[in-house]
Image (tube, helix red, strand yellow):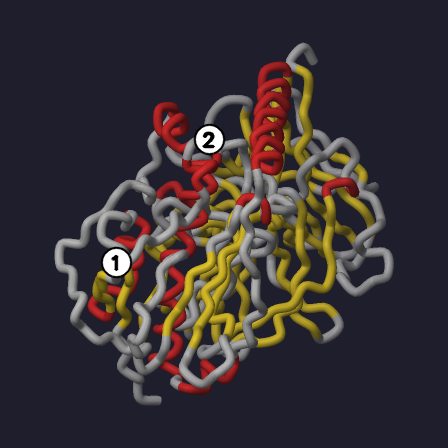
């Protein structure tokens, strides 16, 4: 398909522009230009929230500081882009005709609309003579009582939406517009002093609770098991409890992966020392059930986790998370299961929890990537290659998921009953809060779609406030959890 040329104007009010608008222009690249409009744009977050930002900057100034003032170096107010991106509170002057493709209105979240540990942003596409459409949306995590951190991550995601939307339109033309749902009105939201007092009180209570637990407790990751065939459509899938498998004192286990080799089953996992970076270990299943002692298999000068082990071409391979090294690395086993050596780099970039799948004659790599100001929990990227060993190319719809409630991989993609399922971490509220089970309904070089079918809550693991990985093989299901352990124990 021939590309539809699109130029986007990022509107701003002189004297009121912020650096998140500069980031938006960076994402648009050569297709973006700054357009000055008369008026006064609203802040992307309300003033009572902004009043807390100077205090936050004293504690830790964010990089980038997306709410710092910004003055475009090349303002082009007379240019006529094909679409105009409007910040909150700014509109076209009376009597001005909209661009040919209309306007994109950014709707960041108001603090009073925050719920379930996540905050959402919407991009509404308003074209002349047509009903407005929801062009794109994203959700970010509220994982600590830190408004500046929330706001920065929120606007980092918002700044990327116009480039993603117009990139899709440039490739797919009107078919992309036709695929968008009609936008529902969100309505104004201006809470009064009482609502803001309640907001600040909740922040304070949250901060005190976090300080209490962090001062008198240490956190420990551990595993938990139950019998089952890993079918998310089973009636009791979301209700059957798990039995904990605790690691030795002073360490932790997470990210379980099962692997059968020469008639024996092995459990690979991340080993988390009390202090220091993650490394990898393996536990052998006993003939009568249960697992033996953990043995260390791989340690690097950087953090390791998520040891996805597989057989291919008569050899055993492993792709752990090596995002701290800025790469996706492939290791080959030279003496199973204890000795591994680096074979090659599959992908450059700080990808988190890279997960592989063979489907439709191609190899697919799922991973989350972190944007400036954002996290590695909320944007799923997809890559594909003709062979397991690459070369991998990015999917044109990346990021294919922008939702902290399901983006980050939480275990291998698997087939049950003819359906393809992907475990996705729900990190709303805090990292690894729960696990969403997604059915993949489309996976090809032009598109991707999935739908939630089940959830695993942390309450299924006794004592845990997290559940962020799932594995199933040979009648056994394994997850991980995290608990607070008093420092005197």
Considering only vertical position in the picture, is 178 above or below 378?
below
**Residue depicted at 50% across the width and 34% down the height:** 278
Q: Which SS class for mark 1?
A: helix
Q: Position of residue 108 (x, y in %)?
A: 47, 54
Q: Which SS class for mark 2?
A: loop
1 or 2: mark nearer the eye: 1
Considering only vertical position in the picture, is 203 above or below 45?
above
Res 101 seen here: yes
The C terminus, quarter of image: top right
Furthest-front residue in this view: 94
Considering only vertical position in the picture, is 258 above or below 193?
below
Q: Which mark is residue 277?
A: 2
Considering only vertical position in the picture, is 109 above or below 365?
above
From the viewer's perspective, tell me whether residue 473 is left or right of residue 130: right
Pointer 1 residue: 26
Furthest-bottom residue in this view: 1
Observer-nearest residue: 369 or 67? Answer: 67
**Residue depicted at 58% across the width and 69% down the height:** 184
How many other residues sit within 10 Å of disc 2, few (<14), some (14-19) or many (≥20)? some
How many other residues sit within 10 Å of disc 1, few (<14), some (14-19) or many (≥20)? some
Q: How many angstroms separate mark 1 from mark 2 (CA)?
A: 34 Å
Q: Which mark is residue 270?
A: none
Q: Position of residue 414 (x, y in %)?
A: 65, 64
Res 315 seen here: no
């Amino acid at each position: 398909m021939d590309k539809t040329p699109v130029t986007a104007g990022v509107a701003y009010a002189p004297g009121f522009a912020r650096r998140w608008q500069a980031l938006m222009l960076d994402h648009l690249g050569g297709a973006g230009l700054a357009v000055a409009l008369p008026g006064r744009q609203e802040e992307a977050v309300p003033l009572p929230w902004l009043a807390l930002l100077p205090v936050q900057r004293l504690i830790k100034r964010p990089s980038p500081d997306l709410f710092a003032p910004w003055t475009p170096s090349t303002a082009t107010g007379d240019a006529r882009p094909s679409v105009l991106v409007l910040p909150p509170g700014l509109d076209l002057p009376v009597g001005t005709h909209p661009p040919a493709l209309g306007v994109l209105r950014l709707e960041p979240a108001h603090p009073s609309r925050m719920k379930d540990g996540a905050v959402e942003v919407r991009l509404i596409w308003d074209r002349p003579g047509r009903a407005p459409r929801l062009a794109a949306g994203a959700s970010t995590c509220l994982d600590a009582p830190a408004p500046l951190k929330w706001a920065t991550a929120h606007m980092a995601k918002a700044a990327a939406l116009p480039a993603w939307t117009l990139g899709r339109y440039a490739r797919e033309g009107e078919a992309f517009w036709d695929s968008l749902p009609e936008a529902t009105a969100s309505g104004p939201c201006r809470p009064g002093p009482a609502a803001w007092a309640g907001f600040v009180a909740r922040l304070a209570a949250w901060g005190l609770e976090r300080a209490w637990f962090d001062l008198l407790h240490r956190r420990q990751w551990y595993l938990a098991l139950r019998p089952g065939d890993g079918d998310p459509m089973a009636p009791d899938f979301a209700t059957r409890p798990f039995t904990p498998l605790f690691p030795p004192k002073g360490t932790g286990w997470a990210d379980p992966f099962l692997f059968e080799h020469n008639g024996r089953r092995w459990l690979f996992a991340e080993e988390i020392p009390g202090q220091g970076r993650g490394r990898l270990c393996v536990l052998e299943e006993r003939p009568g059930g249960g697992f033996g002692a953990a043995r260390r298999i791989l340690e690097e000068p950087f953090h390791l986790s998520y040891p996805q082990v597989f057989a291919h071409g008569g050899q055993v391979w492993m792709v752990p998370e090596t995002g701290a090294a800025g790469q996706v690395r492939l290791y080959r086993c030279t003496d199973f299961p204890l000795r591994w050596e680096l074979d090659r780099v599959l992908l450059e970039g700080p990808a988190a929890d890279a997960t592989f799948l063979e489907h439709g004659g191609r190899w697919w790599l799922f991973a989350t990537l972190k944007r400036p100001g954002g996290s590695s929990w909320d944007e799923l990227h997809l890559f594909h290659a003709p062979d397991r060993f690459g070369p991998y190319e990015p999917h044109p719809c990346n990021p294919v998921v922008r939702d902290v409630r399901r983006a980050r991989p939480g275990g291998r993609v698997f087939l049950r009953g003819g359906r393809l399922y992907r475990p996705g971490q729900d990190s709303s509220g805090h990292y690894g809060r729960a696990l969403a089970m997604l059915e993949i309904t489309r996976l090809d070089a032009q598109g991707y779609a999935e739908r939630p079918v089940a959830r695993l809550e942390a309450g299924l693991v006794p004592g845990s406030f997290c559940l962020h990985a799932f594995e199933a093989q040979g009648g056994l299901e394994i997850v991980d959890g995290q608990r607070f352990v008093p420092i005197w124990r």
